[in-house]
Image (cartoon, helix red, strand yellow):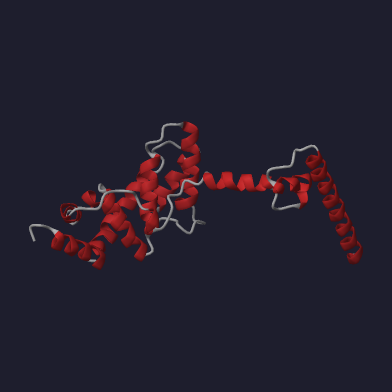
Amino acid sequence: MGSERVEMRKRQMQVHQEAAASVLQAHHKMGNTPTNASNACCFCWCCCCSCSWNEDRDDKNRKASYDIKEGTSDCEECPKPTLEDVCSWGQSFDKLMSCPAGRNSFRQFLCTEFSEENMLFWLACQEFCNETNKSVIEEKARVIYEDYISILSPKEVSLDSRVREAINRNMLEPTSHTFDDAQLQIYTLMQRDSYPRYLNSPAYKNLLNTLSEQSPES
């Protein structure tokens, strides 16, 4: 029985290939050669995993992602920090986070501690809370939830049960404020936990020393 099924499968594939070849030949004779040869497999899309329909669908799914890309090469574009900027970062966490260059530097430090997801989540929430379109809010809320709230995500952020339960309820009808409490909690976590270590890190101290040496007043 097994060999018969194999032979039947081979005959079916041969029939599909011959039929597809006939369609291509007919198009060629009429001067309508397809611009993308992979479209021919749509004739037997149920047997071909590389069908252009599947490729288009995958492209759309990738474009729907709201995750801010990881990696220091994808940090925010901003001017190089001045000595005054870097000194202000040491004065308060708020000043650090209000400066794009400060966020970039701090994010690079978080990468070394394997906690970059905290900054990524905070940045995603900052952009999300400015959204006004209801349908866009619902889609972006879903993606943020899957990326940073779901226990199945490798980038899940650390939230207490109260905030997590509130988000689960609010996801039924998400608004631009759905993640406000979670964003504040992660902000506070970074301020209390990672920020002091950042100020004592070689990354911050070296940057401060380098700019101090380059300063005309030094």
Q: Residue at coordinates 74% horizontally, 42% vertically from top-left?
A: 33
Instruction: Name the spot of residue 174 as percent of width and height, x first.
Output: 46, 37
166 to the left or right of 78: right
Residue 95 placement (x, y as % from top left): 21, 49
Tell whether 108 sits left or right of 173.
left
Most extreme residue toward the left is 217
Query: Is 217 left, or right, of 152 in this rendering?
Result: left
Q: Is residue 38 left or right of residue 61?
A: right
Image spot of residue 86 (x, y percent)? 19, 55
Which residue is farthest bottom? 202
Q: Quadrant of the N terminus?
A: bottom right
- Who's the residue at 47% across and 51% down the image? 147
Residue located at (82% from left, 52% from top): 17
Q: Is the C terminus in the top left, top right, bottom left or bottom right quadrant? A: bottom left
Q: Quadrant of residue 191?
A: bottom left
Asked if 123 appears above or below 153 in the picture, the reply is: above
Q: How many marks?
A: 0
Q: Residue at x 68, y 45 (%)?
A: 36
From what the image shows, is residue 90 above or below residue 140? Answer: below
The residue furthest top is 133
